[in-house]
Amino acid sequence: MKTHYCPHPQDESEEQAVCGTWLGETSNLSGEWSLVDCQRCVRGKKKISASVAAEEDAIVQQMGDMANFMREQLWGVSQEAGHD
Ligand SMILES: [Zn+2]
């Protein structure tokens, strides 16, 4: 039984480990590198960490865009109300 790295181990919908291994019932996932014993995951740690960081950056970026959009929507609404 191998433990693969997963940034979201609580997400049980994951079917494939970050190293590309298809997950079976005997596979474990962990967000802690110290618990990961899959050599493919460990060897790709640098790359995986980078892609996880990039993914998180993208999410942060996306949330920022959404916040800007919401703000624009709110301003639009308040400006319209102000014209009346
Ligand atoms: Zn793995």
Image (spheres, rainbow, N blue to C red):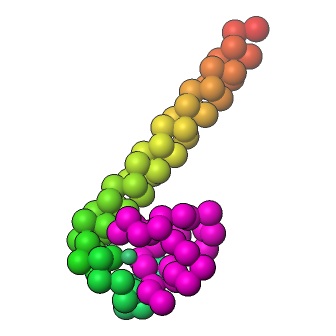
Q: Given the current orientation, which residue lies at the most extreme top position?
A: 84
Residue at 51% in and 46% down: 63
Residue in front for this viewpoint, 57 or 41: 41
Q: Is residue 64 visible?
A: no
Residue 68 higher or lower than 53, as above or below: above
The residue located at (63%, 20%) in the rendering is 76
On screen, residue 11 versus residue 7, left or right, reads right
Task: Answer above or below: position of 36 versus 41.
Answer: below
On whether residue 77 falls in the magenta region, the answer is no
In the displayed structure image, the side of residue 5 where residue 82 appears, left or right: right
| Picture quadrant of residue 20 | bottom left
Measuring from the top left, give residue 40's x and y in whole percent. 29, 77
| Image location of residue 77, percent across then percent down | 69, 21
Where is residue 33? Give x, y as percent: 37, 84
Left or right, 47 with respect to 65, comes to: left
Q: Residue at x 63, y 26 (%)?
A: 73
The x and y percentages for residue 53 are 34, 61
Q: Is residue 64 above or below residue 49?
A: above
Residue 71 sits in which quadrant? Answer: top right
- Part of the protein shown in magenta: 1-29
Q: Residue at x 40, y 55 (%)?
A: 55
